[in-house]
Every structure is written in structure tokens, then in C-alpha cells.
Amino acid sequence: MKTLKKIGRFLRRWNELLSIPTSFVLWYFSPQLLRMMDPTAGSFDAGVFQAILFAVISFLILHGVAWLVLKLSWWTVYDTLDDLPKMFNQKELTVWQRLKFSLALFLSFLLSMTFLVNAIA
């Protein structure tokens, strides 16, 4: 019971991670649901996750290389980006600046992951 409470607190704090087990459950039950609608429907096997795993590994490698190139080429920009968490915590940026930067960063990560998956698949 104590473990379930810990898991509940963890998922309330990190609710973004709830999409991962949900997608695995949907993938597991999708063949049965598809065949209920169309008996001739085919489904994906577990090998489909290798493309996603390869895309994540590629993204992490490219992320590291991009930071290295940024640090070696434009160290002032790197230092500014390295100090951003301090700027966020000390409220040096306005709310709109923080919001714009956060959304741009999230969307750039999402877009790059999408490009990687499309390039691999």
C-alpha cells in the first residue's frame, strides 16, 4: 500500500510520464481492438520500438554534439544558456520571456525528435 502511494505521488509530480505506460497498454491491446473492427487487419510487432529507441539514442548523441559545438564555437552563447536556470529562479526574465523561451525550447526538442523518427522510419 505504501508503494502505491509513492507511485501515485510520483505520477502526480511527473504526470508527463503517464503517456508512456498508456501507449504500451494501447499497443498491447491494439491487435484485439483492430481485429474486432476488421478481422483481416494486421498489427505491428515489438520491433517497431527499435526505431523509437534508435531515434532517442540519435537525439541524445546529437544533443551532446550540439552542446559541444556551441561551447567550442560560441562560448558566450553557451555561458548565457548555462546561466538560464539561475535567471529563471531569480526572476531576471519577465514572465513572457520565460514562457516564450520555454515553449520554443520544448517545441524545438519535439520537432527534432519528429524529424529523427521520420528520417529513421
Image: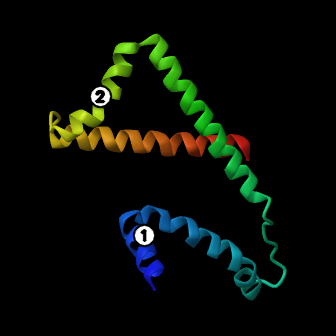
Name the residue carrying label 1. Answer: 11
Q: How many marks?
A: 2
Q: Nearer the viewer, residue 10 or 39?
A: 10
User: In this picture, is 59 found above or below 15?
Assistant: above
Q: Quadrant of residue 36?
A: bottom right
Q: Amino acid at mark 2?
A: Asp
- Horizontally, residue 104 falls left or right of residue 92, namely right
Pinpoint residue 114: horizontal percent, then vertical percent.
Answer: 58, 46
Pinpoint residue 92: horizontal percent, then vertical percent.
Answer: 15, 33
Pinpoint residue 27: horizontal percent, then vertical percent.
Answer: 68, 72
Q: Amino acid at mark 1?
A: Leu
Name the residue carrying label 2. Answer: 83
Write the residue at 21% across / 41% down. Answer: 89
Pinpoint residue 79: horizontal percent, then vertical percent.
Answer: 34, 20
Q: Earlier in the sequence, mark 2 or mark 1?
A: 1
- Horizontally, residue 31 falls left or right of residue 89, namely right
Write the residue at 49% across / 46% down. Answer: 110
User: In this picture, is 113 found above or below 74?
Assistant: below
Gap between marks 2 and 1 measured at Cα = 29 Å
| Mark 1 nearby-residue class (10 Å; few <14, some 14–19, many ≥20) | few
* Residue at the outermost right position: 40
Q: Quadrant of residue 26?
A: bottom right
- Horizontally, residue 28 falls left or right of residue 12, namely right
